Amino acid sequence: SKHVQALSELQEALALQAPPNRIECYDISNLQGTAAAGSMVVFEQGAPSKKLYRKFTIKNVKGQDDFASMEEILGRRFRRWRIANEEAGKPGGKLDKSFGLLPDLLIVDGGKGQLSRACKILEEYNLRAPVPVVGLAKEHEELYLPDRADPVILPRRSQGLYLVQRIRDEAHRFALRQHRTQR
């Protein structure tokens, strides 16, 4: 019931049409710009779905540029979404559940800078309207929404806040693991 309550709180706080049953969160990890890695974690109905997690090696960004790195991994993710749906449409095609489904909520770890890059990628794929996106700033757990100056701050003891923190921490852990593997 805590998952249901958390999803309901997020729906209300972020003014979503329905509870976000599939939440994807993205994070970047690097050491002074070296061995940069990214992660995609997926939570379905408030619980981690580890078989859908994906890791990314940052290939096209030199130095420590988290904004460009976020743009690269989201671009690759939604390019794979397009390819997965094309492949599923072919005779005998099967949908890749990691990339073939769109999230009900996309969370990028970071503030307004990462959020603007995520919005740019969503616009490139004409997904700006169907995919709600927020940027999660670490310091005060603020949720930044596009086209809104003030962040959404969830109540300190709310299940929605606890869920967002778990998702962010899992994305961070998974990105760090990939980063360590690359080093």
Image (cartoon, rainbow, N blue to C red):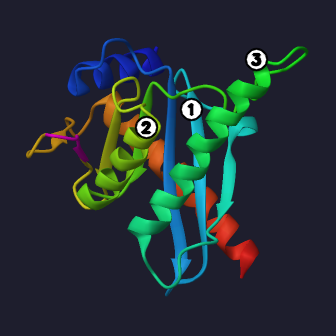
Residue type at mark 3 is: Gly
From the top left corner, tell me how far across and down residue 3 is, in percent: 47, 21
- The magenta segment is 143-147
Specify the farthest residue to the left.
149
Residue at 69% over, 48% down: 54
Residue at 50% over, 51% down: 26
Secondary structure of residue under mark 1:
strand
Dominant secondary structure of the residues highlighted in magenta in the image: loop
Going from N to C along the chain, the mark reached first, 1 or 3, is: 1
Residue, disc 2: 106
Going from N to C along the chain, the mark reached first, 3 or 2, is: 3
Secondary structure of residue under mark 2:
strand
- Residue 145 among magenta residues: yes
Secondary structure of residue under mark 3:
loop
The answer to which quarter of the image holds residue 124 is top left
Mark seen at residue 24 = none
CA gap, disc 3 to disc 2?
A: 25 Å
Residue type at mark 1 is: Phe
Label 2: how many Cα within 10 Å (few below 14, some 14–19, many 20+) = many
On the picture, is 2 further left or further right than 83? left
The answer to which quarter of the image holds residue 161 is top left
On the picture, is 58 further left or further right than 66? right
Residue, disc 3: 89
